[in-house]
Image (tube, helix red, strand yellow):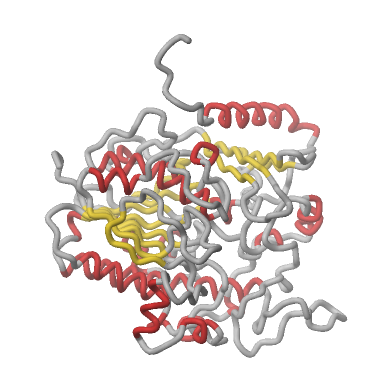
Amino acid sequence: MAVKAPNILWVCTDQQRYDTIAALGNPYVSTPNIDSLVAEGVAFTHAYCQSPICTPSRASFLTGMYPNATHANRNGNDFFPDAYPLVTRTLADIGYDCGLIGKLHLASAYRRIEPRANDGYRYWQYSHAPRDDWEHGHDYADWVRSKGYILGELNRNPEGVPAELHQTTWCAEKTIEFIREERDGPWLASVNIYDPHPPFNPPQTHREQFNPAEMPEPIFRNSDLEQQTRLQAVDFQSKVRTPDELDIRSPILPGSPPVTGKGQTPRQETNAVGATDAKTLKAAYYAMIQLIDEQLGRMLETLQETGQRENTVIIFTSDHGETLGDHGLIQKGCRFYEGLVRVPLIFAWQGQFVNGLKSDALVELVDKAPTLLELAGLTPPEGMHGRSLLPILRGEADASHHRDFVRCEYYDAVDLRDHSFATMYRNERYKLVVYHGHEEGELYDLIEDPDEFDNLWHAPDKQDIKMDLLKQNFDASMFAMDIGPRRVGPM
């Protein structure tokens, strides 16, 4: 390798919102280790995923290309088409020792084991989801068996899987194992923790540290019920409810009766054994993040102990967010509220990156791939949609601006029946959401209405703005299209 490149510890959680870090303004969470990365690195406060669903988002940030180009723009695909190389493959080709710990989800695990892509990973410890109690192919389940337990039985425990046997803990154990291996060249550890993805069932030891009564209310007004009813034909994993009666089908607080509306008997269609209100959900969600933070701390301690901290770039991020009761919704689907499409993105490298910088610039997760390539001494390929963040990280560029707009896409991604398609276009002031094939859409003035309550789609005085944004959205989609092989001649 011509250039001495840094090691890369790339931690990606699943379904973690942007507003879940204490150092970035949330007083209800406990994230001292993530906070330490904010203090010694650069935190991008307006980082957007390119799809609110796992596979298209992951395919996008691993290739630096938008979902419409990767041809992996839905969950449940038969295979990953390799239209563009994964950044891990490119780095492996120049000498990086790459390791996968946890989830990959570039293709369906419906048939138990996800088919491998041309991913470049030498070290492979795979866990699609903690609930998968497969006899073969689930390395986390094998680890649990090696401890004398059966994963399926642990998952039926209403108090959650104990912290010492949790998938988050296993991810840290295997990452530490990888970091400690002897090698001559640089390494990249891609650590894909499943939490805080549903089911919302953290270990009891962590859940009891967060009192639901002390949690903040979700972003909600009664007008959300009408708004989501108008959009009910558009795919989503939950139906709209008031925050005190969400349709959570996961055990999140043992011993609590299911929540019911006035004059109603407990809902028989759910399998919940715990309370299903938004504040209880939020307490469980924060408890899951606390465990993530603790295990991140163990990884950071290992870097320090092995003398590798100063030559390791640390990235903390997530693939997409979670509605968490906002606007009467939980989980994910074809919507683009800030809590669902805006995620944490923190880079830290001691002595190399700016310390304690909080950048409000609009950035996208596709920007990670070209950043990693440049860190390794490579030039990002022409046509890559991502734009390197390295100038901001090194203090060489204006940290208040990176992109004029960010984009997000949804293509028939989850539900096998509804077949919803949508695009989001957001600039510094406005967010436009187009539900293709539907009359309804969304338009928000994020300066006047940051919580996205006042939908201006039909507002008479906003039609010129809407039409201008529709054109910009269409242009951005057209310019991002995969136009096939490189052109070499006039005919």
* Residue 355 horizontal/vertical position (percent): 28, 51
Q: Nearer the viewer, residue 341 or 435?
A: 435
Up the image or down, 407 lies above or below 317; here it is: above
Is residue 287 visible from the viewing direction of this image? no
Is residue 432 visible from the viewing direction of this image? yes
Give the residue drawn at x 47%, y 53%: 106
Up the image or down, 475 lies above or below 315; here it is: above
In the picture, measured across the screen, residue 76 lies left or right of residue 462, that is: left
Give the residue drawn at x 67%, y 61%: 237
Up the image or down, 366 lies above or below 244; here it is: above
Q: Nearer the viewer, residue 253 or 88?
A: 88
In the picture, measured across the screen, residue 182 lies left or right of residue 485, that is: left
In the picture, measured across the screen, residue 369 lies left or right of residue 354, that is: right
Farthest residue in the top direction? 490
* Residue 16 horizontal/vertical position (percent): 50, 61
* Residue 460 horizontal/vertical position (percent): 80, 33
Up the image or down, 282 lies above or below 186; here it is: below
Farthest residue in the right direction? 263
Q: How many marks?
A: 0
Give the residue drawn at x 50%, y 32%: 404
Q: Quadrant of the N terminus?
A: top left
Give the residue drawn at x 34%, y 45%: 87
* Residue 464 horizontal/vertical position (percent): 72, 27
